[in-house]
Image: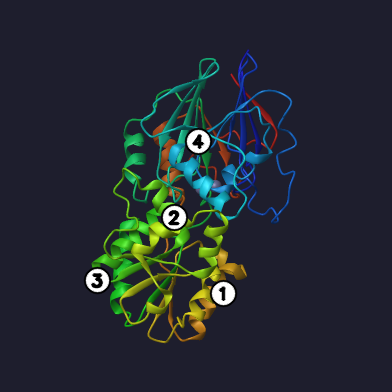
Amino acid sequence: MPLTLTVHRGTQQIGGTCIEIAHPQGDRIILDAGRPLDAPDGATGLLPVSLDRSLPATVLISHPHQDHWGLVEDLPAAWPIWTGSGSAKLIAVTGDVMRRPLARTFETWNSRSGPFAVGPFTVTPILTDHSAFDAYMLLVEGAGKRLLYTGDFRRHGRKSALVDRMMADPPADIDVLLTEGTNLGSDKPVKSESELESDFVELFGRTCGRVFVAWSGQNIDRTVTIYRAAKRTGRTLVIDLYTADVLDRVSVGTRLPCAGFPNLKVVVTSGLRNNYKNQGREDFIERMVPNGISAKRLEGSRHVIMLRRGLIRDYQRAGVVPTADDAFNFSMWRGYLSEPYHSEALEWCRAAGAEVAYIHTSGHASPADLRSFAAALRPKSVVPVHGVKWDEESDGFGVVRRLADAETLTIP
Ligand SMILES: [Zn+2]
Ligand SMILES: [Zn+2]
């Protein structure tokens, strides 16, 4: 009896990923339980209907982006859920700050864990490069077959060496490569995080006032890039309580910047202060205060200041208003600017005459890197997920098994 593979969701879209690998003995592994990116806020009942919840399964979450873990609360309580230890912390911080603490707990692996058994399967988490911290590829072996799921990855971030190393010495005899294809069909340039650092240095250097930057507090690669550029130009990076919380949780035992580092301050705004009080985390606020800066002091030319919609009102109240001497940089996917949540910060700065810049690079591999990766891995077949251009762009990937959502593939 062979192994079977079912992509419950993700063959025709980016995000919402949910993949099942079933062993002939009946054991099942579910790779990711992602919330579709286009699901309306508050929508429920989003697990794919084809996912049988009446039978046991073990769930592996590749990385802490909601399009990969956002439905974990809907999974049967008896199903164990595994993820990386850093990933578990970042998933928890999201629940805490949204005041919906996660009811589920995770079993965790880390980058040094090596292979572990899940029933008759052997799972090997392989730390990779992505805009999410603690992202893994997952090698799943069972019934004599080997499947590699890339999760989301790139080859131009601060951990690109991990992907290079894997390509130079790939796991042998991969039967199926389940690969993401987010950037297929786009020719947008992908810059490395170190190139971005130089671009930020240039922007910080030529701006006579403050530089406001919008980025995701969970994109730790980007926090590091912006922090390094601030330091190189003699500026101080000002992060909000949430970003300080993210760094506080994951920086232990690493060289990642966190509160207490030079050229790094935490702005304690009333909105987030109340949020953390309501979480019962006054102790965290107290710990941040010695490294804090009052919003009232964010004037002059020394600061690089985190900005997003939720901070505008608190800044305004403290008299922090952009001027024509300042600059604004949007350091996220440009498509988000169609949402008021993201565009408001940009418009607030533009209206004041501040320079608007766009220094950003994708969290996902370029089409060329996707093809090189597949070529290096030499799988018997490639199953496309997490993309919308696979039908047009599957050349250069070897033998492609294009599945529909919920279609089951028998791995011979
Ligand atoms: Zn994703
Ligand atoms: Zn991701």
Say which element carries label 3.
Answer: loop
Q: CA distance from mark 4 to mark 1?
A: 34 Å
Residue nearest the observer in this picture, 55 or 285: 285
Circles 2 and 3 in contact, beta carbons < 8 Å: no
In this rendering, the label closer to the viewer, 1 or 2: 2
Which numbered disc flags the more N-terminal residue, 3 or 4? 4
Which numbered disc flags the more N-terminal residue, 2 or 3? 3
Residue that numbered label 1 is attached to: 344
Residue that numbered label 3 is attached to: 234
Residue 400 percent location from the top left of the image: 56, 35
Task: Mark 2: give few (<14), some (14-19) or many (20+) Cα within 10 Å.
Answer: some
Residue nearest the observer in this picture, 90 or 122: 90
- Count every numbered label the image shows and give the total: 4
- Marking on residue 83: 4
Q: CA distance from mark 1 to mark 3?
A: 28 Å
Q: Is residue 138 above or below residue 320?
A: above
Residue 294 shown left or right of residue 52 in the figure: left
Residue nearest the observer in this picture, 227 or 280: 280
Q: CA distance from mark 1 to mark 2?
A: 29 Å
Q: Is residue 40 above or below residue 115?
A: below
In this rendering, the label closer to the viewer, 1 or 3: 3
- Marking on residue 284: 2
Quadrant assignment for the N terminus: top right
Q: Determine if the C-beta at disc 3 is less than 8 A from ligand 2.
A: no
